[in-house]
Image: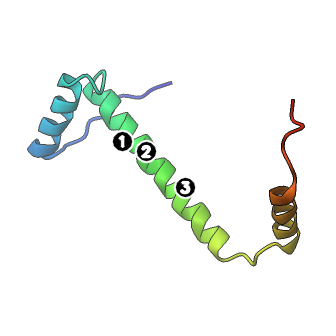
Amino acid sequence: MTKQITIRLPDELVTFIDQVVERGHGASRAGVVARALDRERRRQIAARDAAILAGVEPDQDLDDLAAHAVRTPMDDLD
């Protein structure tokens, strides 16, 4: 489902969006804006996740598992 909204953007941003569409890197102005907003949403989620992980103590069990995986040969995966 989509909703139509009206936004005001500075002339230089509209010019940039139009150039992106003209170069074939977007199907429409709406597509370019939606892609940029989706990228920003993913960036904010990743930043939030990184902040959460930065505040968590290392998991010794996972460290041991990773060390074991590094020493495990992978030649029998066929």
What percent of the width, then of the height, locates residue 32? 31, 32
Which residue is drawn at the image coordinates 36% and 41% (left, top)?
36
Q: Residues within 10 Å of mark 3 (few under 14, many from 20)?
A: few
- Name the kind of residue labelled 3 in the image: Ile
In this view, 61 is above or below 41 = below
Task: Please give left or right for residue 64 compared with residue 41 in the image.
Answer: right
Q: Residues within 10 Å of mark 1 (few under 14, many from 20)?
A: few
Sequence order check, earlier mark of 3 and 1: 1
Q: CB of mark 3 within 8 Å of CB of mark 1?
A: no
In this view, 56 is above or below 38 = below
Q: Nearer the viewer, residue 29 or 68?
A: 68
Q: Quadrant of residue 31?
A: top left
| Residue receiving disc 3 | 45
Task: Please give left or right for residue 68 compared with residue 53 in the image.
Answer: right
Q: Nearer the viewer, residue 29 or 1?
A: 29
**Label annotation for residue 22:** none
Which residue is drawn at the image coordinates 12% and 36% (left, top)?
15
- Name the kind of residue labelled 1 in the image: Ala
| Residue receiving disc 2 | 39
| Residue receiving disc 1 | 36
Q: CB of mark 1 within 8 Å of CB of mark 2?
A: yes
- Element at badge 3? helix
Q: Quadrant of the C terminus?
A: top right
